[in-house]
């Protein structure tokens, strides 16, 4: 979001902001499903889980300018759960980082839209992710650079919940807490499902908020599909802080499409023509409601 | 006997000099301030020494993040831990992301002799030269270490500097220039070529002296940049008809492998590749080097073997 729209944002009412993010998240969901259907591959479950969080960031919170994607003072967003390119690419297209028509090239030979984000192909990507446990520690490094320079940019990382089983996440969490990185916010997409099963049946994460607090973090627990609650949490995060902030966003994998919701099997998969039509109809009905 | 130097001193001295004029330069360590000799750097630039504790994966990722934030991070730790523990971070966060990170493997090779194979870093060059976009430099003496640090700062992209703690003399040079990707011809010769890196460059020169006394003219090439490798220098060496490579690392996959790949494609030539065969028995660094023929005698013997075989 550029300076002009930042000013617009601060003038906008909360109601307008929520309505805008809600509309954009719904558009992202429809657009990313179209992209996945066209490509014949994708990770719709996690994309739909993360869409409201990513929409709140790209269409309200982040201070970014698509015309200057590497401006020194930009806010940084790192998609640590790098497989959720549907959410990221639809948001970047919607925010103007590239033409929406590029989404039709997803996964095609030499497309800039790789199966996992690549900063050297695509403006707006901060670091290449894909293997879990990488993006968040890199975001910690960016926040350290900002802390050293007393820069006013902020750093956001979106992690999966299953991703928190990677040891490197806790190395980074411990260090961020130690450094008191108040410019850093991590959002955990807490949909409770990893690729094959529930996190709690695989390698349990709870009590998750206590873990982050014990590592020196502030913790907020929000409904990750409630746009107002997400904006409130991000607004609160903007105040000067002595600790990094972890927003545990309670989400559902496949959110917005009834037959995908909370189903591990839609971690990756492609809807059939009939399923796609049903998904679009449900999303359009939700927007109209 | 010429004076001997620990190349880490040239590393930290150069880093401090550069950091005094370049705010972007920071150091990142894994509780390795002492072994990286960065105590003076920390005292002089306390805000620019970032100690992540004993956490190599995070150290490399934090380095990549610092680069994203406009810094030029020198990520320094024992080569064995920096490379093996953080391999995917080096591949993805540094190489694949083309982050402007300078990785410094301290006490590389078999400097930690008696501590055993866990603490030897003999696989690093083989591993890291397989990573696209990552420059791999193995300086041979204090002067070249200093030049490599300067070149790493000037180069926009990820670099691995493989630094030794074994005492070495300063090489005699007629043409003192360092450029990433350019080998240094230390001695001309037409009968055999010895291509070496790091500590082995000094043994290569001594081997060339011994061979000269026998009437054998040996070329000596210091191949400080292993990736990207100087193909033209290898092809010139291949014109002698016999190449010995020597490195303080595995005999396969590292410098020797890189030279052999170029020769096999463009100029097949008889070769001997000197290095270690794998996990090593207990012994001091000096003993291990001698035991495995990484000495002037060992290199000269390999050269003689090649020349005899040529008949």
Image: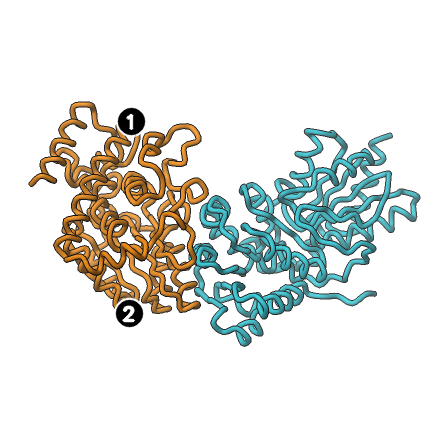
Chain colours: A orange, B cyan
Q: Are marks 2 and 1 on the same chain?
A: yes
- Residue at screen point 55% across, 44% down: B133
Q: Is residue A87 above or below residue A274?
A: below
Inspect this view and state whether residue B37 appears.
Answer: no
- Residue at screen point 67% across, 65% down: B10
- Residue at screen point 71% across, 62% down: B142
State the image coordinates of residue B216 (x, y, percent, origin top left): 89, 42
State the image coordinates of residue B135 (x, y, percent, origin top left): 59, 47
Q: Is residue B111 left or right of residue A178?
A: right
Q: Residue furthest bottom?
A: B43
- Residue at screen point 50% across, 68% down: B49
Q: Which mark is residue A273?
A: none
Q: Is residue A235 above or below residue B294?
A: below
Q: Quadrant of residue A156?
A: bottom left
Indicate the quadrant containing the C terminus of chain A: top left, top right, bottom left or bottom right: top left
Residue contact between numbered discs 2 and 1, judged by CB atoms under 8 Å: no
Q: Earlier in the sequence, mark 2 or mark 1?
A: 1
Q: Quadrant of residue A271?
A: top left
Secondary structure of the residue carrying tag 1 is helix
Inspect this view and state whether residue B184 appears.
Answer: yes
Q: Which mark is residue A38?
A: 1
Q: Is residue B9 left or right of residue A52?
A: right
Q: Is residue A271 left or right of residue B90?
A: left
Q: Chain of mark 1?
A: A
Q: Which mark is residue A241?
A: 2
Q: CA distance from mark 2 to mark 1?
A: 44 Å
Q: Quadrant of residue B55?
A: bottom left
Q: Chain of mark 2?
A: A
Secondary structure of the residue carrying tag 2 is loop
Residue B54 vs residue A130, the one in the foreground: A130
State the image coordinates of residue A207 (x, y, percent, origin top left): 20, 59
């Amino acid at each position: 979001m550029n300076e002009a729209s930042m000013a617009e944002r601060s003038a906008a009412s909360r109601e307008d902001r929520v309505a805008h993010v809600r509309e954009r998240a719904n558009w992202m969901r429809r657009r990313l499903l179209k992209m996945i259907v066209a490509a014949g591959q994708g990770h719709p479950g996690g994309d739909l889980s993360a869409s409201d969080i990513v929409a709140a960031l790209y269409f309200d919170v982040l201070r970014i300018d698509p015309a200057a994607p590497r401006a020194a003072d930009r806010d940084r967003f790192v998609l640590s759960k790098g497989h959720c390119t549907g959410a990221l690419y639809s948001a970047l297209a919607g925010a103007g980082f590239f033409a929406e028509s590029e989404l039709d090239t997803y996964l095609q030979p030499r497309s800039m839209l790789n199966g996992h984000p690549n900063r050297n192909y695509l403006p707006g990507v901060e670091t290449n992710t894909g293997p879990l446990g990488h993006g968040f520690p890199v975001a910690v490094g960016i926040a350290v650079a900002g802390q050293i320079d007393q820069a006013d940019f902020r750093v956001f990382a979106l992690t999966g919940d299953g991703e928190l089983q990677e040891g490197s996440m806790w190395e980074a969490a411990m260090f961020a807490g130690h450094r008191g990185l108040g410019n850093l916010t991590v959002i955990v997409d807490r949909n409770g499902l990893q690729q094959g099963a529930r996190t709690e049946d695989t390698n349990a994460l709870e009590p998750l908020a206590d873990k982050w607090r014990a590592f020196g973090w502030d913790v907020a627990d929000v409904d990750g599909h409630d746009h107002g609650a997400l904006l409130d949490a991000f607004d609160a995060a903007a105040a000067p802080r002595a600790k990094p902030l972890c927003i545990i966003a309670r989400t559902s994998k496949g959110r917005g499409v009834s037959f995908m919701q909370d189903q591990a099997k839609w971690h990756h998969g492609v809807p059939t023509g009939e399923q796609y039509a049903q998904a679009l109809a449900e999303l359009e009905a939700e927007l109209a409601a | 006997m010429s004076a001997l130097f620990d190349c880490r001193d040239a590393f930290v001295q150069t880093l401090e000099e550069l950091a005094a004029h370049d705010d972007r330069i920071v150091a990142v360590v894994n509780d390795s301030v002492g072994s990286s000799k960065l105590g003076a750097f920390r005292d002089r630039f306390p805000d620019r020494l970032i100690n992540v504790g004993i956490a190599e994966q995070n150290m490399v990722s934090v380095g990549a993040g610092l680069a994203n934030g406009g810094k030029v991070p020198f990520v320094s730790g024992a080569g064995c831990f920096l490379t093996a523990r953080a391999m995917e971070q080096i591949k993805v966060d540094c190489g694949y992301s083309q982050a402007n990170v300078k990785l410094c493997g301290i006490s590389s090779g078999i400097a930690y002799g008696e501590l055993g194979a866990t603490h030897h870093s003999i696989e690093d060059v083989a591993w890291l030269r397989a990573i696209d976009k990552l420059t791999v430099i193995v300086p041979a003496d204090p002067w070249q270490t200093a030049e490599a640090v300067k070149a790493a700062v000037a180069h926009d992209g990820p670099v691995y500097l493989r630094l030794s703690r074994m005492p070495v003399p300063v090489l005699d040079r007629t043409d003192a220039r360092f450029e990433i990707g350019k080998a240094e011809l230390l001695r001309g010769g037409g009968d055999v070529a010895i291509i070496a890196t790091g500590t082995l460059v000094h043994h290569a020169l001594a081997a060339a002296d011994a061979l000269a006394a026998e009437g054998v003219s040996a070329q000596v090439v210091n191949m400080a940049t292993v990736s990207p490798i100087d193909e033209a220098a290898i092809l010139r060496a291949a014109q002698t008809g016999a190449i010995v490579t020597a490195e303080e690392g595995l005999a396969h996959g590292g410098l020797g492998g890189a030279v052999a790949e170029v020769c096999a494609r463009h100029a097949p030539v008889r070769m001997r590749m000197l290095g270690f065969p794998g996990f090593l028995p207990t012994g001091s660094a000096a003993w291990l080097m001698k035991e495995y023929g990484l000495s002037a005698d060992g290199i000269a013997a390999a050269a003689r073997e090649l020349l005899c075989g040529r008949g």
